[in-house]
Amino acid sequence: PCRTPSCEKSTLQLTGHREKALWTPDSRLSWRQRSCSGTDICWDRNAPAQVQLNPGKTYVIQYTLNVCAASAAEGTGTILLRQSPCGVFADVPPLCFSLERMAHGPQTLQHVSVLHPRTSSGCAVDLSLVLNAKTALCVERAMMDLVEL
């Protein structure tokens, strides 16, 4: 967990748990911590697919994934930013991508969103990236940064 003076804005930088990881549909992507400051964003190695946020703050989240499809598939896939409990932050549009393009080699997917609080429930919010696709993805490289505004 992060421990610094409370007046400092919180930041968290994460990298993929391992290179060339298989990310299966409806599962969460696991992370390793690169750096952390502040007290309002925390990552725990015992729950590597989740980040905890203070529900009363506003955050910017940015992630970059270098991925390819594990097998040929048609249509589109999405990457969802799942929050638990639901509804604490305003919904974030998913990142949509073409599965056909993924079959031709690695693609870079990038997404930036602002998380606006809807309510201050008092308890921490667990945030994770979830794959919604017809096939698994091979994650060659992944990075995610969260910054308190």
Image (spheres, grey):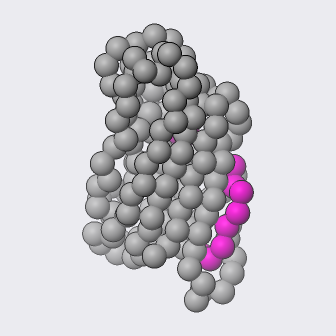
Q: At x 66% / y 48%, what residue is drawn?
A: 15
**Does the rendering let one see residue 23?**
no
Q: To which quarter of the image does residue 38 belong?
A: bottom right
Residue 40 can be seen in this image: yes
Q: Position of residue 7 (x, y in %)?
A: 58, 89
| Segment tinted magenta in the rendering | 28-39
93 is within the stretch colored magenta: no
Q: Is residue 81 above or below residue 13?
A: above
Displayed quadrant of residue 89: bottom left
Q: Quadrant of the C terminus?
A: bottom left
Residue most extreme to the top? 72
Q: Is residue 29 magenta?
A: yes
In the rendered image of this protein, does residue 124 appear above or below residue 25? below
Q: Quadrant of the N terminus?
A: bottom right
For the residue pair 100 and 133, the one nearer the viewer reads as: 100
Residue 41 location, x and y as percent? Answer: 56, 67
Residue at 37% across / 25% down in the picture? 98
- Residue 3: percent from left, percent from top: 69, 76
Q: Is residue 43 left or right of residue 119?
A: right
**Nearer-the-camera pick, 43 or 96:** 96
> How many marks can you see?
0
127 or 138, nearer to the observer: 138
Looking at the rendering, which quadrant does residue 91 occupy? bottom left
Q: Residue at x 68, y 41 (%)?
A: 17
* Residue 120 versus residue 99 in the image, above or below: below
Q: Residue at x 44, y 33 (%)?
A: 131
